[in-house]
Image (tube, helix red, strand yellow):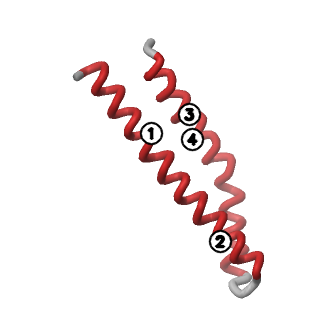
Amino acid sequence: MDLLLWITFAFIIIGFVALLTMKKGMESKVDFVKANIASEESSTNAKSVIWWIWSTIAWGVVSISLVVWCFHNYFG
């Protein structure tokens, strides 16, 4: 197998495992923000949830790009 294919597999698997392990913590932070809207800690938790969402989007875009690049290299 080519190095690009290994990098693609590793990036997708490691990112997916990281997202799954962080999911429960983010759910609890969202629940905390819903319950305590006015607190300072709620603002910090909300920012971390927003960063997690943006990083998940970035991971998804890079994963899709790597898969498309692999298809282009092997079937194009």
**Relative to 41, residue 17 above or below:** above
Name the front one of labels 1 and 4. 1
Label 3 with label 4: CB-CB less than 8 Å: yes
Q: Amino acid at mark 4?
A: Phe
Residue assigned mark 4: 16
Residue 38: image x %, image y %?
72, 87
The quarter of the image holding the C terminus is top left
- Against 71, residue 27 (above or below) is below
The numbered disc on residue 25 is none
Q: Residues within 10 Å of mark 4 (few under 14, many from 20)?
A: some
Identified by mark 1, the residue type is Ser
Q: Position of residue 72 (x, y in %)?
A: 28, 27
Q: Are marks 1 and 2 in contact (CB under 8 Å)?
A: no
Q: Quadrant of residue 25?
A: bottom right
Q: Which mark is residue 46?
A: 2
Question: Going 76% across and 83% down the picture, which residue do you hit?
Answer: 39
Q: Are marks 2 and 3 in contact (CB under 8 Å)?
A: no
| Distance from Cα at disc 1 to Cα at disc 2 | 26 Å
> Where in the figure is residue 44, as x and y percent of width and height?
71, 71
Spatial CA distance of label 1 from label 4 is: 10 Å
Residue furthest toward the bottom?
38
Residue of label 3? 13
Q: Secondary structure at mark 3?
A: helix
